[in-house]
Image (cartoon, rainbow, N blue to C red):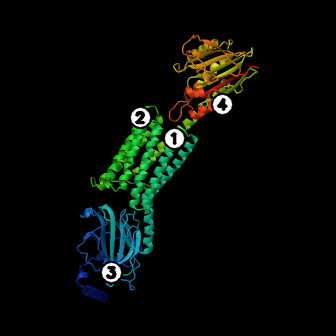
């Protein structure tokens, strides 16, 4: 009991000495120091502790506020865990100061602290940290003329304690947009090594929160851009693949701009210049892709819409912030509506792939538009802040509704484009096989070598508008040394026209009579029968034909079924007009006889020469045809082709040179 009493006396004596020391220090520091707020902290901290309360706050800027002797007791006292608005402080723009006085216990004998502060600013807020009136650190954008960078966490050493054993932390902040939270979001105090690790961890979280999802999406879009470019190289006539590649590149560019801003590589002024142009590029390429994909005849409407969207970047460049925000919101809804209507109309017109893309795009566009509208309303305090952007998590990676919308749209586009590519490839293979078969048929229609004898010399030229055509000609030597010349043109183009022409050539070679009028009558009946076959368009099925038989003496018997008259030494022969083959049955064709002279030249041609059209829309015409009719066959065909070929071109020339 005696020992216990002695211990109690010693404890009371120690408390009296401590109180006396504190009183003496208070008397030495004067009355002002006795009124100031101090936060007692450990001089040595393993790890870190968060400091949220005890801060003094004032809007404005005065260099004197960095002085440790400045009296800040009239300032607002705030807690960093709550927004300024919740603590009765209105939103502001520009400079504001935070002050906090720390008293490390026990005071270091050397006066040097082994403590650091880690600060995380809000969004684009910039900070400058002073410890006991001396600058300890600042963010990238905090300069003489501040710029709004996406501020990264910083770690600043506290240095030495003041003579009174305290450290006055004064944080000068600046933010260029209205804020309800202030520019300072999070502060931790701890040993330098631990806080260096915390800064690294926070930087990694910033990547996961603002960068990783955007970069992953951008790389996916770049991969699809490469795929689309490859498809376009394989099928050059499908320009929607090219515009899909440009669309994906625009999304990737926009994601890289967002990532560069989120990592603090570019200030918000540069971001606000680049982002509207990236958005405009995306809108324009998407509209053009959907236009070409759906084949909707809205070209003029889409062009006007693309030009109208150009107003957005221009308003941003002119610093018309409010018009830019409202125009952006309106254009977002307009863009989504136009795309949905175009896909819906294409689906109703019998394009099932448009229907496959319609539902995913509608859902993604609806979710993204609602998210944009809520953000817009929350930024203007029309709705509570918790209605703003919803963030989702995939492990540590955060993403928003916009990322989901992009990926859903991308998946539907890739599925539809691959389906169309496979379908088109199969169709092209079928067409290639048909064209190859038609070319073999074409060899029957267009002789590669023309017969000649001592009385006649022939030249020919044939230039189809496509792989195969409907023109045909035959030069058949007869037993009496006469020549039967037949030149014709079946209506239409491509394989069907070639098949109809081959039918006529087959009938011609089996024809027993070589009288021109009789030959045309027989071919007319053959054409009527071919056009009456099931699955054949009887309205468009007809053929023009010219048949002439020339004897060694120069006598020529000729009949015409709606074809162009031949030219004799640069002058058109006047022939009796008659209906083309295949129009009505049992037509009697009129023939006439012409006597050729030594050295006469006859030129037979198809309407592909006369109907050649230049880029201005001018026809080659009969006058030019007559002027070149005495030229070689190949020259006539080539000059018409260079003028502007629109149809198959056939030219057959005959020189009468009797022995």
Residue mark closest to the camera, 2 vs 1: 1
Between the C-alphas of marks 2 and 1, the distance is 20 Å
Q: Is residue 620 above or below residue 560?
A: below
* Front one among 374 and 53: 374
Which quadrant, please, contains the N terminus? Answer: bottom left
Looking at the rendered image, the disc whose residue lies closer to the viewer, 4 or 2, is 4
Say which residue appears at 33% left-offset and 75% top-offset.
169
**Where in the figure is residue 442, as x and y percent of width and height?**
65, 26
Choose the circle earlier in sequence order: 3 or 2.
3
Helix, strand or loop at label 2? It is: helix
Secondary element under disc 3, as helix, strand or loop, is: loop
Name the foreground residue: 387 vs 617.
Answer: 617
Q: Tell me, for residue 634, which label it has, or none.
A: 4
The residue that mark 1 highlights is 239
- The quadrant of the picture occupied by the C terminus is top right
Q: Nearer the viewer, residue 151 or 546?
A: 546
The residue mark sitting in front, 3 or 1, is 1
Which circle, 3 or 2, is nearer the viewer? 2
First reached walking from the N terminus: tag 4 or tag 2:
2
User: Alpha carbon of mark 4 to alpha carbon of mark 3: how far?
Assistant: 103 Å
Identify the secondary structure beneath mark 4: helix
> Which of the two residues, 316 or 512, is positioned nearer the viewer here?
512
């Amino acid at each position: 009991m005696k020992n216990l009493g002695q211990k109690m006396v010693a404890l009371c004596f120690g408390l009296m000495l401590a109180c006396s020391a504190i009183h003496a220090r208070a008397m030495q520091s004067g009355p002002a120091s006795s009124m100031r707020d101090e936060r007692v902290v450990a001089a040595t901290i393993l790890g870190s502790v968060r400091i949220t309360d005890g801060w003094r706050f004032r809007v404005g800027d005065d260099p004197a506020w960095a002085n440790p002797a400045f009296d800040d007791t009239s300032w607002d006292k705030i807690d960093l865990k709550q927004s300024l608005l919740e603590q009765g402080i209105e939103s502001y723009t520009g400079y504001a100061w935070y002050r906090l006085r720390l008293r490390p216990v026990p005071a270091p004998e050397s006066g040097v602290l082994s403590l650091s502060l880690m600060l995380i600013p809000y969004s684009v807020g910039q900070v400058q940290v002073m410890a006991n009136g001396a600058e300890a650190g600042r963010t990238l954008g905090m300069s003489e003329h501040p710029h709004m960078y996406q501020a990264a966490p910083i770690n600043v050493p506290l240095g030495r304690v003041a003579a009174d054993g305290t450290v006055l932390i004064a944080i000068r902040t600046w933010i260029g947009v209205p804020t309800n939270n202030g520019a300072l979001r999070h502060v931790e105090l701890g040993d330098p090594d631990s806080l260096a690790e915390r800064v690294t961890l926070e930087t990694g979280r910033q990547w996961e929160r603002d960068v990783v999802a955007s970069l992953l999406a951008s790389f996916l879009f770049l991969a699809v851009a490469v795929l689309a470019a490859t498809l376009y190289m394989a099928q050059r006539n499908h320009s929607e693949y090219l515009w899909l590649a440009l669309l994906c590149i625009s999304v990737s560019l926009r994601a890289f701009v967002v990532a560069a801003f989120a990592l603090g590589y570019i200030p918000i002024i540069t971001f606000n210049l680049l982002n509207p142009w990236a958005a405009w590029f995306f809108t324009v390429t998407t509209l053009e892709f959907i236009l070409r994909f759906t084949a909707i005849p809205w070209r003029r409407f889409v062009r006007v819409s693309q030009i109208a969207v150009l107003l957005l970047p221009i308003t941003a460049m002119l610093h018309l912030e409010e018009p830019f925000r409202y125009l952006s919101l309106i254009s977002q809804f307009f863009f989504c509506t136009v795309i949905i209507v175009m896909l819906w109309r294409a689906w109703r017109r019998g394009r099932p792939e448009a229907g496959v893309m319609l539902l995913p795009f509608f859902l993604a566009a609806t979710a993204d538009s609602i998210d944009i509208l809520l953000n817009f309303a929350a930024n203007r305090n029309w709705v509570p802040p918790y209605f703003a952007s919803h963030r989702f998590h995939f492990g540590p990676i955060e993403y928003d509704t916009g990322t989901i919308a992009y990926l859903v749209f991308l998946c539907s586009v890739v599925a539809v484009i691959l389906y169309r590519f496979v379908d088109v490839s199969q169709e092209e293979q079928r067409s290639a096989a048909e064209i190859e078969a038609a070319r073999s048929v074409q060899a029957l229609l267009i002789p590669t070598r023309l017969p000649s004898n001592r009385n006649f010399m022939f030249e020919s030229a044939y230039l189809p508008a496509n792989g195969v055509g409907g023109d045909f000609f035959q030069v058949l030597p007869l037993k009496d040394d006469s020549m039967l010349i037949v030149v014709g043109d079946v209506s239409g183009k491509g394989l069907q026209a070639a098949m109809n022409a081959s039918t006529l050539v087959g009938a011609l070679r089996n024809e027993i009579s070589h009288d021109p009028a009789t030959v045309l009558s027989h071919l007319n009946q053959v054409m009527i029968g071919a056009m009456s076959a099931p699955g054949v368009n009887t309205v468009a099925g007809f053929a023009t034909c010219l048949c002439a038989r020339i004897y060694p003496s120069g006598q020529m018997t000729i009949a015409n079924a709606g074809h162009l008259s031949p030219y004799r030494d640069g002058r058109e022969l006047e022939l009796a007009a008659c209906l083309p083959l295949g129009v009505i049955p049992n037509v009697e064709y009129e023939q006439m006889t012409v006597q050729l002279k030594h050295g006469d030249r006859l030129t037979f041609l198809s309407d592909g020469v006369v109907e050649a059209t230049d880029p201005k829309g001018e026809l080659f015409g009969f006058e030019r045809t007559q002027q070149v009719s005495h030229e070689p066959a190949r020259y006539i065909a080539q000059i018409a082709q260079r003028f502007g070929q629109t149809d198959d071109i056939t030219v057959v020339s005959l020189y009468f040179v009797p022995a």
